[in-house]
Amino acid sequence: MKEKIDKVIEKVEKSDKVTPEDKPLIIQKLKEWREEDNAINDIAVRFENWWMEVEPIFAEMGLV
């Protein structure tokens, strides 16, 4: 999971959809979570819950 968090950090750093003001805050929090084993599980659960909410939208658009 730590490798996945590193990939997310890279994507946030390269993203043009995240404001320059928000990037350092998001990256800092991700780095904190990367070091906490319980937080890693929390991130996985949050992403899973998020996907369950947005999957129907993507499905309607024909992207899933």
Image (tube, grey):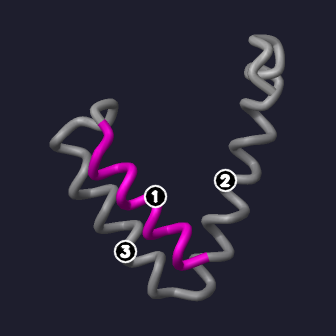
Picture residue at 39% right of the left edge, 50% below the top = 11
Asked if the magenta segment contains residue 23, the reply would be no
Q: Residue at x 62, y 84 (%)?
A: 38
Displayed quadrant of residue 25: bottom left
Dot placed on the residue nearer the N-terminal end, 1 or 2 = 1
Q: Which residue is mark 3?
A: 31
Residue of label 2: 47
- Dots 3, 2 in contact, CB < 8 A: no
The boundaries of the magenta stretch are 1-15
Classify the position of the N terminus by image quarter: bottom right
Q: Secondary structure at mark 2?
A: helix
Q: Position of residue 57 (x, y in %)?
A: 75, 19
Classify mark 1: residues with Cα within 10 Å, few (<14), some (14-19) or many (20+).
Answer: some
Q: Residues within 10 Å of mark 3 (few under 14, many from 20)?
A: some
In the figure, is residue 9 to the left or right of 34?
A: left
Please tell me which residue is depicted at 46% across the width and 58% down the height of the picture: 8
- Tags 3 and 1 in contact by the CB under 8 Å rule? no
